[in-house]
Image (cartoon, rainbow, N blue to C red):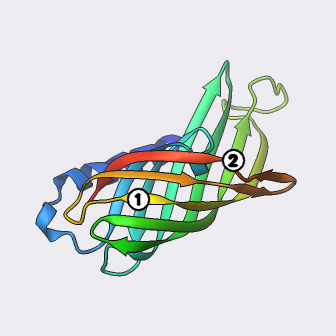
């Protein structure tokens, strides 16, 4: 249920992004789908700058869910990022984490449909390139996204993103 609420929220943000007039863009914001990357397999994300500018310090939040035969995992990548560049071409550096929750349908002692079996938070980084037009529109990202923490270290994980900047 929580995951559905997050997905609805992200789709509403995407809808408001498409309704924006391209000439009014003064703050960098975007919604995008990321394949692999910080969401591990995929994620839907919202990204925004803290100040009234297209580059600089900002944040991202996202969500994903994968299920097979009643077992599944939900991931929630969050983080801070910094965009360095101009004219819609940016070098992106970020740090954050991904919270994951595993669900297991075989747990007969739990009640309800969502039987949590395990959860974990692992650290993430982002080192990449972002193409985000200054007047809004198609957003593209590609990045190296290392994972670390709790005995996990994947230095060469990567992701690619496609979305809409507004």
Direction from residue 109 to residue 136 in the image, left or right: left
Quadrant where the C terminus is found in the figure: bottom left
Q: Quadrant of residue 48?
A: bottom left
Q: Is residue 31 above or below residue 69?
A: below
In this picture, residue 121 sits left or right of residue 137: right
Name the residue located 42 percent from the left edge and 57 percent from the top edge: 46
The residue lying toward the viewer, choosing from 106 and 108, is: 106
The one nearer the camera, 92 or 110, is: 92
Instruction: Locate residue 36 relative to residue 69 in the image: left or right.
Output: left
Residue situated in front as seen by the camera: 164 or 92: 92
Q: Position of residue 21 (x, y in %)?
A: 13, 61
Q: Which mark is residue 64?
A: none
**Where is residue 128 drawn, in percent x and y?**
51, 59
Residue at the spot of label 1: 130
Please name the residue that numbered disc 2 is placed on. 100
Task: For marks 2 and 1, give the CA distance.
Answer: 26 Å
- Residue 115 position, x and y percent, is 73, 34
Residue found at the very far bottom of the displayed protein: 51
* Between discs 2 and 1, the one toward the N terminus: 2
Label 1 secondary element: strand
Quarter of the picture containing the N terminus is top right
Q: Residue at x 49, y 66 (%)?
A: 92
- Residue 55 placed where, x, y %? 37, 74
Which residue in the rendered view is the most extreme toward the top?
69
Labelled pair 2, 1 in contact (Cβ < 8 Å): no
């Amino acid at each position: 249920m929580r995951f559905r609420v997050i997905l609805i929220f992200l789709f509403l943000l995407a809808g408001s992004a498409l309704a924006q007039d391209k000439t009014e863009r003064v703050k960098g914001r975007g919604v995008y789908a990321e394949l692999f990357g910080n969401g591990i397999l995929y994620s839907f994300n919202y990204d925004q700058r803290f100040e009234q500018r297209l580059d600089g310090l900002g944040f991202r939040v996202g969500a994903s869910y994968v299920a097979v035969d009643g077992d599944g995992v939900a991931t929630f990548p969050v983080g801070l990022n910094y965009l360095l560049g101009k004219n819609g071409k940016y070098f992106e550096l970020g740090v954050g984490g991904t919270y994951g929750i595993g669900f297991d349908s075989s747990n007969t002692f739990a009640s309800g449909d969502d039987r949590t079996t395990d959860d974990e938070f692992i650290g993430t980084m982002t080192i990449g390139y972002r193409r985000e037009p200054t007047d809004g529109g198609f957003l593209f990202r590609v990045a190296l996204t290392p994972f670390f923490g709790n005995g996990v270290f994947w230095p060469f994980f990567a992701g690619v993103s496609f979305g809409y900047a507004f």
